[in-house]
Amino acid sequence: QVQLVESGGGLVQAGGSLRLSCAASGSIFSYNLVGWYRQAPGKQRELVATITRGGSVNTADSVKGRFTISRDNAKNTVYLQMNSLKPEDTAVYYCSVLTTTQRAYWGQGTQVTVSS
């Protein structure tokens, strides 16, 4: 059983920055994939950014150049640095990992609200 705890969400003005953190109960390095997803009201959950065990990064076009995913293996933590935030980035952000047995785990989510 993997537990994920997100933090760092909040209210920010457009153009501002936030850094989300996701602390995992297991070794981040052992997972095939770790990433961030988001879900806005009335919309489907969508990928924001992921990073593989080998370090390959995939970032959604909508946030490319503004958001950066990273991980600290020693702290078993994944980060999402969000810069130049826009009102359309408002959503609940979820951390997720995919284990070597292809099982996905999700955090409880953290709200990010960007005011115009």
Image: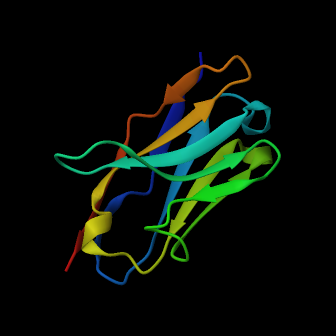
Question: What is the x, y in percent for residue 84?
Answer: 42, 81
Q: Is residue 97 left or right of residue 45?
A: right
Q: Is residue 57 above or below residue 2?
A: below
Q: How is the image coloured?
A: rainbow
Q: Position of residue 1 (x, y in %)?
A: 59, 15
- Residue 45 is left or right of residue 66, and the answer is left
Name the spot of residue 23 as percent of width and height, x first: 59, 41
Q: Is residue 100 above or below residue 80?
A: above
Would you say 65 lies left or right of 55 here?
left
Picture coordinates of residue 15, whole percent (x, y)? 36, 84
The front one of 17 and 55 is 55
Residue at the outermost front position: 61
The reply, left or right, for residue 53 in relation to residue 113 is right
Q: Quadrant of residue 57?
A: bottom right
Q: Quadrant for residue 116, please give it.
A: bottom left
Q: Nearer the viewer, residue 44 or 95?
A: 44
Q: Is residue 62 above or below residue 77?
A: below
Residue appearing at x 63%, y 41% in the figure: 34
Residue most toward the bottom?
15
Viewer-nearest residue: 105 or 73: 105
How many labels, in total?
Answer: 0
Residue at left offset 31%, top offset 75%: 86
Q: Residue at x 50, y 42 (%)?
A: 95
Residue at the (78%, 41%) spot, across then down: 53
